[in-house]
Image: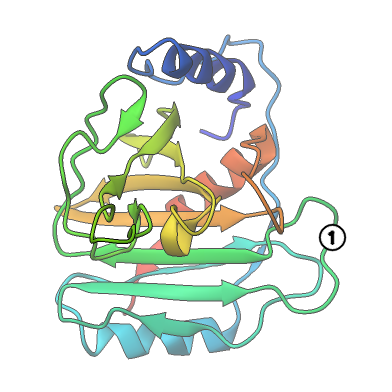
């Protein structure tokens, strides 16, 4: 599961640029494995998961590991507690390791995501922005703008043996809360989940093989609370 996806991501990005849907991410059997860069989740994160579990209907999948930063995270914050969604916000603390995320978002909703893509973009139709995964164009004077800004498809990894989607959000502000992030979007047991990370203070996060392996590892090592 954690095999390097570099070749697939390059192919997917090229197809997206040509207006084609990204194919399933596959690699040659001889491709080297890339180790994820993760660290154990903290008791504070588990406490935030329990906060969400007390409010939302779908299972809160609390991660056993988080993307490693070299200095840990500030106290987690919980957003979007509306009965159907939760979104955990993690901001790196202190000096980060090279290429380590400075902002991570982990969320879930009580409906699965539609993982279909079109012309290298996702989603194919307007979606309710309950996990803030789809940003909106800034409003223009006179009331124009505000349309949803699709994300760029980078690849199609698998999470727990199921199809998933790797996408990149537009830079902030058009990309919204996930602006510039690489997102792993997937479904488990009829609910939709996202693991999102940003490694650069400005611009777009590169989808390196290690970052992809890290996002998949966090998703696969998340568990419903007991």
Residue 5: give x, y in percent of width and height. Answer: 58, 25
Residue depicted at 36% across the width and 46% down the height: 185
The correct choice, above or below, for 35 with respect to 80 in the image is above
Is residue 80 left or right of 4 when viewed as pictured? left
The correct choice, above or below, for 134 with respect to 88 in the image is above
Determine whether the residue tagged by mark 1 lies in a helix, strand or loop: loop
The correct choice, above or below, for 174 with respect to 79 in the image is above
Residue depicted at 61% across the width and 36% down the height: 207
Is residue 15 left or right of 8 when viewed as pictured? left
147, 211: nearer the viewer? 147
134, 30: nearer the viewer? 134
Is residue 39 left or right of 157 when viewed as pictured? right
Residue linked to disc 1: 97
The image quarter in which residue 90 lies = bottom right
Specify the color scheme. rainbow
Residue depicted at 27% across the width and 49% down the height: 148
Q: Can you see residue 44?
A: yes
């Amino acid at each position: 599961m954690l095999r390097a996806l570099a070749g697939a991501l390059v192919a997917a990005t090229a197809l997206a640029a040509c207006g084609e849907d990204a194919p399933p991410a596959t690699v040659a059997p001889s491709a080297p494995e890339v180790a994820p860069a993760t660290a154990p989740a903290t008791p504070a994160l588990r406490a935030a998961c329990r906060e969400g579990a007390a409010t939302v209907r779908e299972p809160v999948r609390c991660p056993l590991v988080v993307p490693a930063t070299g200095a840990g995270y500030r106290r987690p914050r919980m957003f979007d507690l509306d009965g159907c969604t939760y979104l955990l916000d993690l901001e790196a603390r202190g000096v980060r390791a090279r290429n380590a995320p400075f902002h991570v978002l982990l969320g879930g909703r009580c409906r699965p995501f539609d993982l279909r893509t079109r012309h290298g973009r996702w989603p194919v139709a307007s979606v309710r922005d309950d996990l803030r995964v789809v940003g909106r164009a800034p409003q223009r004077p006179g009331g124009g703008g505000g349309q949803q800004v699709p994300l760029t498809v980078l690849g199609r990894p698998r999470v727990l043996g199921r199809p998933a989607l790797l996408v990149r959000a537009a830079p902030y502000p058009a990309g919204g809360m996930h602006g510039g992030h690489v997102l792993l979007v997937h479904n488990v047991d009829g609910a939709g989940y996202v693991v999102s990370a940003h490694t650069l203070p400005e611009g777009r996060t590169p989808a390196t093989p290690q970052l992809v392996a890290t996002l998949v590892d966090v998703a696969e090592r998340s568990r419903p609370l007991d």
